[in-house]
Amino acid sequence: MLNARFFSTIAHIRDLPTDSQREVAFAGRSNAGKSSAINVIANQKRLAFASKTPGRTQHLNFFETQAGRFLVDLPGYGFAKAPFTQQRAWQQLIGGYLADRRQLVGLVLIMDIRHPLTDLDRHLLNWFRPTGKPIHILLSKADKVSRSQAMQVLRTVQTELDSAGFTAQVQIFSSTHRIGLDASETIIRQWLDMVKPSKESPSPATAPDSANILANTPEAIP
Ligand code: GDP
């Protein structure tokens, strides 16, 4: 898990964090399981539900995993009447962010495994395609279908995206049953260029050489 913490809520492109190095965005239809997925990946019970509070539903929520590395929760789509790419707010903030954000390294798209590739998902994929950046798809709520059904949907979605020329990987996922957590975390860590703590090589904080140095820094004071 990534241990992210809430960083900021953004309503305008001009407010995007300036010292960000890498960002991974999370998108999906409302109710697809996006908030649950972010919470379980980020190891926080209620982190992503901030985006559901009134007044914040059209904002970008930034969660920091390591200095300068962010998970970005995009507003869920699907409830508004107009297709989202025709809405001014969407075009300006979310569309602008997806199309132009240099620090954005990849998109995680969450789709309910029982309703994959809806028109709005296709819309978003096509919108994102010109960036050439990779897409990782979580087929969420996989606990709701049998293993063989899940594998069938996985194959169908992967084949469709491959033949449409997307740089996309698809996996099955369940927040409640913690299915596919390691695979998604591995991808996000790679994209964010994060270092995974390894049991074999001790981290600097536990290495004998650095222990004395750390003991003299303010951070070491309980
Ligand atoms: P969002 O609108 O995309 O952020 O979706 P939420 O994360 O709020 O989830 C929508 C509903 O689906 C909630 O009732 C969740 O409890 C449920 N849900 C989310 N993920 C899973 C899952 O992996 N398995 C099951 N069975 N239900 C889930």
Image: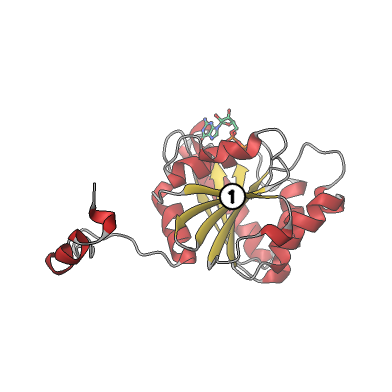
Name the residue type under label 1.
Answer: Ser
The answer to whether 168 is drawn above or below residue 5 in the figure is below
Question: Which residue is pictured at 66% across the width and 39% down the height?
Answer: 115
Residue 130 placement, left or right of 173: right
Position of 106 relative to 147 (above/below): below
Q: Residue at x 50, y 35 (%)?
A: 46
The answer, for residue 32, to whether it is visible in the render is no
Residues packed near mark 1 inside 10 Å, few (<14), some (14 to 19) or many (20 plus): some
Q: For residue 98, what is the image quadrant? A: bottom right
> What is the x, y in percent for residue 86?
87, 52
Residue 19 position by quadrant: bottom right
Of residues 151 and 89, the one nearer the viewer is 89
Quarter of the rendered structure image containing ligand 1: top right
Ligand 1 is within 8 Å of the C-beta of the residue at disc 1:
no
Q: 141 or 186: which is nearer to us?
A: 186
Q: Which residue is mark 1?
A: 8
Depth check: 152 or 74 in front?
Answer: 74
Residue 29 visible? The answer is yes
Does residue 57 appear left or right of residue 85 in this picture? left
Q: Position of residue 132 (x, y in %)?
A: 66, 71
Q: Count the marks.
A: 1
Instruction: Locate residue 72 relative to residue 213 in the image: left or right.
Output: right
SS for dot 1 = strand
At x 59% / y 53%, what residue is drawn? Answer: 72
Q: Residue at x 56, y 61 (%)?
A: 23
- Foreground of the two, 101 or 85: 101
Relative image position of residue 80 (x, y in whole percent): 82, 38
- Where is residue 217? Give x, y as percent: 25, 61
Quarter of the image where one finds residue 200: bottom left
Q: Is residue 51 above or below residue 88?
A: above
